[in-house]
Image (cartoon, helix red, strand yellow):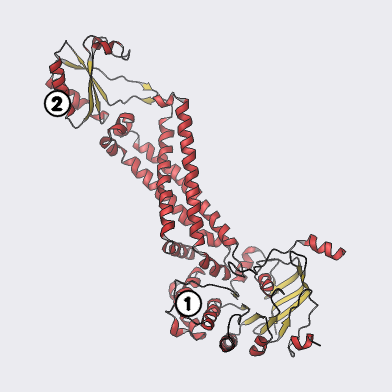
Amino acid sequence: MPIMVQISELSCSSPEGVPLFCDFHLQLERGNLLCVVGQPGTGKTLLLSFLCRELRPPRGQILIDNCNILRLSPERFRRLRFRIGVVPQQEEPLLHRTLAGNLRFKLRALSFSAANATQRARETLQAVGLSAQEDRYLSNLSPAEARIFQLALAICSDPALLLFDDPTSRLGASESERLLAVLRSVQQRRRLSVLVTSRTAAVADALGAPLVSLKSPAQRPLEHTPELPADEDEND
Amino acid sequence: MSLKSILYLFGQLLLDARPRVGVIAAIGILLAFLWTLGLALALLLNAGQVEDVSAALLMALDRPTAQAEVSSLMERSRAWPEVWRVRYVFPEQALNADAALPQETRANGYLELQLLSPSDRDAVAARLSAQASWLSLIPPPHGLIRRFWQEEPSLHAIVLGLLVGIFLVVLLIFYRAFQLLAQGWMAEGQLLKLAGLSSRTLALPFSLVGLLCGLLATVGAVLLARWSPFLARRIPLLSAWLPELGAGRLNVEISLEAALIGLALSGLVGLLAFVAAVRAFERLCLAGRNAPGAPKLILPKAQERTESQR
């Protein structure tokens, strides 16, 4: 199975000198899900920042779709970056626009034509189950629906890779279940490669995804354990 | 990002701008237009010697004339639309007048009429001669002269100081307006940065806004320069100080000069908008605009070497 994301020998420390990653390895196969689990402060968002090249790690290699993103020219990375969808932990979509308006705004900014943007917006909202709310504003949505809409924003431009930071934060149990069901459905239908970060292994269980665990203060070299949840392994 | 998408975002930016930003930008545009016109005038009117196109009409009295006759003529001429001011220079005053005036003016004095436009000289002179045969036209001086402001270094310093001061104020006002514009577009900026657009790309529509502000100021300055003869006729003081404007001789040069200065200013304002937007959007990151856990910069490799030595 071709590899979508491969991280090798990633090492870095916080400004206070606390090691966050120490020879960290990670591999996500194309069309699959992977869940990165860790407590707050263990570097989950930081890992996504590296993948988006918002920050550069002092040591390590990061390959996305067989391209070493740390060595790509800005122009080539920009083309690759458009194929990565990102759902951050905190985001405030445009409150003065409707759901469809938000999607059209993003798609038009990415050089889609007006007609194409409208059609894609409709299809995306249909894919995530929000087509009935396309003319509503974000303030009228429940927390789960708002998070599902953020997922729609990320996938509307048909990315090859989706990075989802802590999808179930600030959601209750039933809302989390609904969100993860939509995510699983979208991933399967579109054969998306998805990297999800989470504070608990329950997300990995719900998604049926293999799990990679981050620990603080120092990271041990990790083994990819698709069969067992990492928590059970590390509690031994 | 294509030109089409930049223009789309430019349109959205204008639609989303808050009224407060519009007011500040309007003040900036007004000041910029005044500054552009002022600089164009200062450069042109300080350029060496200029042809004397005085709007003053001097009519010498050929004989001693009764005061009543002179007063009556002055009253009538004040009512003429071309005349701004009339005064009679007595023979004693004429003795101390400009040495270029002919000798005969000093014996009987002369009438000095300030006109709204130099082009009205001939018509008013003919009308006066028809009504009072004892008047004769004193030929206007020809040649090149220097204006009084060209001889005063202190005036230069004041004008230069004013122009520099207004220029800095214009830049500050525009920078503040673009800062507010960018701050009001943070949600849009965050959304588009997550989509993969860089801060510099996001700042391009702001450059267009800056260019637009500069161009509006330029158009205003050029239009006012083109209308200056019309305005000079309506504003006597302007015509008296700058008779070239009333004669329509300088308005083309001023328009061109103002257009060039305005275009340069537009480019500068566009660059200013770009810088303001890049600075505003650069702090947006994956963790969100105000997230407490926003990733900090990673230590450089020197820190790693230190740790490996421990």
Name the image quarter holding residue B12.
bottom left
Answer above or below: position of A150 versus B193: below
Counting other residues with Cα less than 10 Å from the Cα at mark 2, is it few (<14), some (14-19), or many (20 or more)? Answer: few
| Residue in front for this viewpoint, A77 or A181 | A181
Q: What residue is at 47 percent from the left and 49 percent from the top? A: B173
Q: What residue is at 50 percent from the left and 64 percent from the top? A: B185
Counting other residues with Cα less than 10 Å from the Cα at mark 1, is it few (<14), some (14-19), or many (20 or more)? Answer: many
Q: Position of residue B232 (x, y in %)?
A: 29, 35
Q: Position of residue A17 (x, y in %)?
A: 78, 65
Same chain for marks 2 and 1?
Answer: no
Name the image quarter holding residue B103.
top left
Q: Position of residue A149 (x, y in %)?
A: 52, 80
Residue A15 placement, left or right of B112: right
Is label 1 in a helix, a strand or a loop? helix
User: Label 2 lies in what chain?
Assistant: B
Name the image quarter holding residue B41.
top left
User: Label 1 lies in what chain?
Assistant: A
Q: What residue is at 44 percent from the left and 57 percent from the top? A: B21
Q: Which residue is mark 1?
A: A138
Q: Position of residue B233 (x, y in %)?
A: 26, 35
Q: Which residue is mark 2?
A: B76
Residue B219 placement, left or right of B58: right
Q: Amino acid at mark 2?
A: Arg
Residue B120 placement, left or right of A159: left
Is label 2 in a helix, a strand or a loop? helix
